[in-house]
């Protein structure tokens, strides 16, 4: 699944370079992808194969025809791989992964002055890296170079949840300044998560009164402005005497003379990053660019949260930017149109780094460890609560024979102190930690009536508390990946797995939370694995029920291949499972397919395939109407016996009508399935407790008949 909404996309020219243009300014639907001609680099230039392009508000204004000096070519920043170097280029080579400020970069290839190109930090994906150039260079030049921000300064950042705004927040906090931000109210929780104490509404002028109130009438030292109209004089009014006003607005900005008429004591700065700063002083621009990248390499700055659209969905991306509904950056990805050999290999498994796997001594954890070794890892920490089994020891010995350092640690990931000690030991005795795969987990299934907090805690502690401990304790470590092994239980649900579903839902949300904060993360909603993992230990009845639903297991080689692809693609959350969807949705009955499957899973030909399949007992309600009450009871009893037989995996003739379901070996998960079948086939419900208190097939049939006949039947 893509990160962006589905929709009719633009057509990409096949087997040739392309560029995004606006054919007729004023309407975003006039964006087109047309074939383009590559330009060989002149001396001092490089040609870049573009992997991702950053979208800026100026691009939207340009497409809408808001500038008099309109060009129908758009784009100003990209990330990608150098494919050609011109004469005299130093410090950059063919094959280098880079970030660039480059005009016309909504294209498959772009040629640009090498002064505006810097190497991409290894731990960042191309999508993450492209959030850096315009946002951080603009904020850095405005705050650090022009306004000379210093510790203790009070800084008002308008549109603080946008790309430049979030970059400015990081830079201001890094400088020791006190940040005041404006944003639309739905974005306030995110800004609070960054530590902002003073947040105001960007859609009213009340911010000025609020600032003066909370500063005791003193105001702020710096304003970083991107708003227009009355926001400008109101922003000037909150500046201290001798304050600095940095104007970023692309339209309707004030002239210096207008500012002087209102506040002659204020230092006023207005600039254009590309057309002025970069063009007039390329050497200075490159120095500034490299200073910023150094901060990312050191981990003192983080990439911005991004919402990614494929290049075909440029219209949706531009419209999302125009509506200002996003946080951080909008990124256009060209990944699908890159040759397989040049696609991003963002796994970054290095022999001189350390990788930690929680649940690392289980079958699945050991498979992942072996895969990491195959990718080049030479330093592993396998964390588990118990000592390694003889099988685990054999696998570890084989890895050690390949000159791999494998450190086995017994620790409980739900105990913060124990996790902190593990990380401290890595810091003291091993190469830098660069990857975490959190695969720890346990099962304790049972319907909600049978659950209690102890059972919830047993399942949730390793997943929820363990994941949170890793998150908190590694926030300042520049990890290449932070992988959370979630489950399809959080997407599809699982009979009797309320605790397990809740725990995995937390992992999914943690991945999104980390990415919004500029930290690497992905949550993988795994289906059941064959041979390894918790699903491998399930009993035959559960396996049979999975099969009846169209669910099959992931072979280990398939799962590991999928893991590699997930890390390369840069998803935040993705499901990996093997399901026969037309068969799976039959459990819901005709006309009862939930919206999730109707809108997401069942598309096109698959929907037709589902609709063509007959549902279970399609004529049962009509057949009940055509017979007497006593015959109805027999018909219902036969129907229930057949369903119980399916769940138990036995022949229906072996089941006694008056024997309790529990005595037959019926468990809570089977009860959930039977109840769901009854609801789907007859549209009536039976309380779950009835299946768990010794009720027989005949008694269940009587309960159903009672509901179908409006309570006129006496139930024994």
Image (spheres, helix red, strand yellow):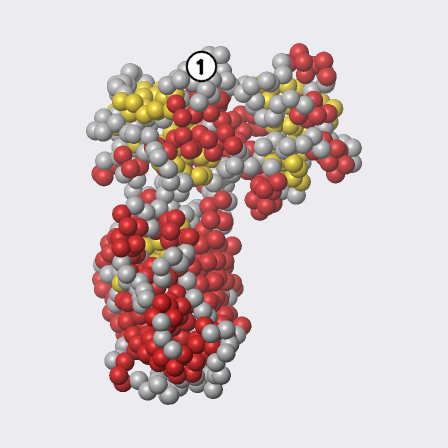
Task: Determine the secondary structure under disc 1.
Answer: loop
- Please name whichever residue, 366 or 608, is drawn nearer the observer in this view of the structure: 608
Callout 1: 10 Å neighbours few (<14), some, many (20+)? some
Q: Quadrant of residue 231?
A: top right
- x and y percent of residue 612 in the render? 27, 55
- x and y percent of residue 491 in the render? 41, 57
Marks counted in the figure total 1
- x and y percent of residue 577 in the render? 31, 57
Q: Which residue is mark 1?
A: 70
Q: Residue at x 47, y 17 (%)?
A: 65
Q: Is residue 177 left or right of residue 492?
A: right
Q: Is residue 669 visible?
A: no
Q: Residue at x 28, y 67 (%)?
A: 548
243 over 644 or under it: above or below: above
306 over 420 or under it: above or below: above
Q: Is residue 336 left or right of residue 142?
A: left
Q: Residue at x 40, y 40 (%)?
A: 4
Q: Quadrant of residue 698?
A: bottom left
- x and y percent of residue 437 in the render? 38, 57
Q: Is residue 256 visible?
A: yes
- Please name whichever residue, 628 or 222, is drawn nearer the observer in this view of the structure: 628
Q: Residue at x 27, y 21 (%)?
A: 36
């Amino acid at each position: 699944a893509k990160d962006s909404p589905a929709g009719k996309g633009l057509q990409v020219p096949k087997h040739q370079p392309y560029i995004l243009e606006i054919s007729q300014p004023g309407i975003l639907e006039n964006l087109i992808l047309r074939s383009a001609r590559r330009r060989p680099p002149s001396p001092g230039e490089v040609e870049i194969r573009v992997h991702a392009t950053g979208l800026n508000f100026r691009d939207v204004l340009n497409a809408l025809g808001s500038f008099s000096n309109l060009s129908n070519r758009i784009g100003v920043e990209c990330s990608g791989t150098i494919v050609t170097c011109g004469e005299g280029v130093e410090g950059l080579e063919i094959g280098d992964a880079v970030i660039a400020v480059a005009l016309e970069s909504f294209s498959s290839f772009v040629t640009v002055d090498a002064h505006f190109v810097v190497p991409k930090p290894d731990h960042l994906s191309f999508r993450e890296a492209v959030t850096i150039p315009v946002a951080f260079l603009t904020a850095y030049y405005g705050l650090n170079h022009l306004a000379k921000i210093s510790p203790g300064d009070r800084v008002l950042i308008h549109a603080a949840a946008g790309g430049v705004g979030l970059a400015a927040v990081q830079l201001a906090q890094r400088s020791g300044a006190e940040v005041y931000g404006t944003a639309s109210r739905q974005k306030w929780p995110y800004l609070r998560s960054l530590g902002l104490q003073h947040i105001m509404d960007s859609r009213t002028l009340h911010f000025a009164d609020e600032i003066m109130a909370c500063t005791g009438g003193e105001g702020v030292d710096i304003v970083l402005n991107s708003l227009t109209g009355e926001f400008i004089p109101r922003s000037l009014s909150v500046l201290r005497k001798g304050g600095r006003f940095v104007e970023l607005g692309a339209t309707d900005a004030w002239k210096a003379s207008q500012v002087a008429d209102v506040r002659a004591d204020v230092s006023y700065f207005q600039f254009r990053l590309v057309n002025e700063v970069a063009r007039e002083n390329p050497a200075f621009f490159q120095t500034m660019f490299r200073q910023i990248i150094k901060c990312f390499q050191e981990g003192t700055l983080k990439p911005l949260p991004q919402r990614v659209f494929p290049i075909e969905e440029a219209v949706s991306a531009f419209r999302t930017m125009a509506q200002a509904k996003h946080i951080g950056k909008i990124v256009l990805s060209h990944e699908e149109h890159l040759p397989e050999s040049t696609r991003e290999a963002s796994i970054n498994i290095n022999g001189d780094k350390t990788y930690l796997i929680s649940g690392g001594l289980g079958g699945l954890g050991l498979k992942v460890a072996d895969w990491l070794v195959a990718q080049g890892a030479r330093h592993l920490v396998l964390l588990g609560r118990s000592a390694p089994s003889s099988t685990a020891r054999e696998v570890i010995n084989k890895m050690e024979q390949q000159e791999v350092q494998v450190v086995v640690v017994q620790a409980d990931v739900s105990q913060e102190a124990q996790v902190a000690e593990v990380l401290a030991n890595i810091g003291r005795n091993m190469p830098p930690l660069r990857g975490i795969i959190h695969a720890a987990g346990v099962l304790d299934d049972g319907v909600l009536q049978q659950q209690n907090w102890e059972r919830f805690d047993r399942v949730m502690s390793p997943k929820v508390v363990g994941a949170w401990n890793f998150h908190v304790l590694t926030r300042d470590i520049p990890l290449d990946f932070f992988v959370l092994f979630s489950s399809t239980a959080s997407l599809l649900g699982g009979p009797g797995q309320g605790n397990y579903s809740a725990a995995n839902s937390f992992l999914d949300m943690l991945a999104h939370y980390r990415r919004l904060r500029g930290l690497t993360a992905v949550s993988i909603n795994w289906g059941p694995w064959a041979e390894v993992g918790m699903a491998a230990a399930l009993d035959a009845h559960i396996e049979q029920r999975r099969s009846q639903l169209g669910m099959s297991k992931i072979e280990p080689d398939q799962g590991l291949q999928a893991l590699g692809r997930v890390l390369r693609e840069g998803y935040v959350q993705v499901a990996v499972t093997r399901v026969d969807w037309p068969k799976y949705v039959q459990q819901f009955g005709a006309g009862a397919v939930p919206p999730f499957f109707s809108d997401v899973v069942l598309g096109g030909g698959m929907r037709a395939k589902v609709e063509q399949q007959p549902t279970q007992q399609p004529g049962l309600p009509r057949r009940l109407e055509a017979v007497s009450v006593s015959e109805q009871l027999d018909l219902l009893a036969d129907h229930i016996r057949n369903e119980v037989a399916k769940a138990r995996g036995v022949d229906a003739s072996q089941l006694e009508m008056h024997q309790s379901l529990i005595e037959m070996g019926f468990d809570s998960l089977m009860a959930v399935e039977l109840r769901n079948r009854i609801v789907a086939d007859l549209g009536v419900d039976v309380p779950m407790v009835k299946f768990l208190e010794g009720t027989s097939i005949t008694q269940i049939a009587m309960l159903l008949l009672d509901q179908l006949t409006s309570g006129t039947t006496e139930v024994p």
